[in-house]
Image: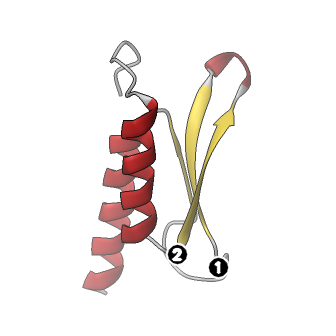
């Protein structure tokens, strides 16, 4: 994670969130402010009883996507 990296503009964020929502319908996505650390993206599994990753919190949308993709691949491998 690179905290100095440029932040994407609003339209890019909306498009990326739409793709994430379509690719991972089991998750709900939001943006949370976490005190002095600033904003973080949150992906939370809708069905808390389901197996696999439950919550991802990160400042980087690409890192969020990568974590969800790893979890999806791991669950498919079972």
Circles 2 and 1 in contact, beta carbons < 8 Å = yes
Residue shown at the point (40%, 69%) measured from the top left: 22
Q: Is residue 44 left or right of residue 6?
A: right
Residue 26 rendering spot, x and y as whole percentages: 52, 75
Residue marked by disc 2: 26
Residue 6 rendering spot, x and y as whole percentages: 34, 17
Q: Is residue 48 left or right of residue 10?
A: right
Residue marked by disc 1: 47
38 or 13, which is in the foreground?
A: 13
Residue shown at the point (70%, 29%) measured from the top left: 34
Residue 63 rendering spot, x and y as whole percentages: 36, 43
Residue 73 rendering spot, x and y as whole percentages: 27, 73
2 or 18, which is in the foreground?
A: 18
Say what secondary structure mark 1 lies in: loop
First reached walking from the N terminus: tag 2 or tag 1: 2
Callout 2 crowding tier (Cα within 10 Å): few <14, some 14–19, many ≥20: some
14 or 59, which is in the foreground?
A: 14
68 or 17, which is in the foreground?
A: 17
Would you identify the image quadrant in which residue 57 lies? top right
């Amino acid at each position: 994670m690179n905290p100095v990296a440029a932040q994407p503009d609003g339209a890019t964020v909306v498009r990326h969130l739409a793709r994430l929502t379509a690719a991972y319908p089991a998750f709900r996505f939001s943006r949370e402010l976490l005190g002095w650390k600033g904003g973080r993206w949150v992906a939370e599994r809708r069905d808390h009883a389901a197996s696999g990753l439950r919550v991802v919190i990160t400042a980087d949308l690409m890192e969020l996507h990568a974590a969800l993709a790893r979890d999806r691949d791991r669950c498919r491998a079972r």
